[in-house]
Amino acid sequence: MILDIGVRLDPEFNIEKELSPYLVRIAQKNTFSVTSAKKVTVSLLETTDAILDMPRHLNLMLRRFSTGTIRLDIVDKDLQEFQVALDSASDKYMIGLVVGSLVIGSSLVLTATPLTVPPEVSWIAILGYGAAVLVGFYAVYHIIFLKFRQER
């Protein structure tokens, strides 16, 4: 390709004459040292070992997939920090949700309407408020219990 373009542009183009000074200079620099040859050899041996071990590893992996005995352990400090932050955020969200429901429930119970409301509605509101209080106490207890259990 280079020869064709060179001949088209200059009919007297000689690739050997043009490239020989550069090739001689590269050969004189001794770019391939003993250490680079050792690195290439070690890398080639490691690659060959990996290629030769691949069928055995694939067979083992397929056997574990077929028997269902595969176990994947991912332990990463960043992942654990993310989990702790997510737990903390969900705890705060849960407490906010409970407090908000308590406020709304108490406002429904304590609201005096000018309309006459059957007494069953008041009792249903009081039962809902009581259930929200119990769920709130359970959520707070559960969050505190989990925090103490994780610290131990």
Image (tube, rainbow, N blue to C red):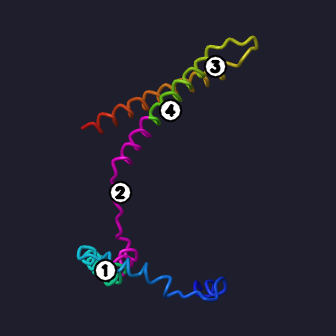
Q: Can you tell which mark lies on residue 74? A: 2
Residue picked out by circle 1: 44
Q: Residue at x 27, y 78 (%)?
A: 37
Q: Which of marks 1 and 2 is nearer the N terminus?
A: 1
Residue picked out by circle 3: 108
Viewer-nearest of labels 1 and 2? 1
User: Residue 81: x percent and y percent?
Assistant: 37, 42
Are the residues at dot 1 and dot 4 in contact (C-beta closer than 8 Å)? no
Label 2 to label 3: alpha-carbon separation: 48 Å
Q: Which residue is drawn at 44% across and 40% down?
A: 86
Label 1 to label 4: alpha-carbon separation: 56 Å
Secondary structure found at label 3? helix
Q: Which of marks 4 and 3 is nearer the N terminus?
A: 4
Viewer-nearest of labels 1 and 3? 1
Label 4 to label 3: alpha-carbon separation: 22 Å
Are the residues at dot 1 and dot 3 in contact (C-beta closer than 8 Å)? no
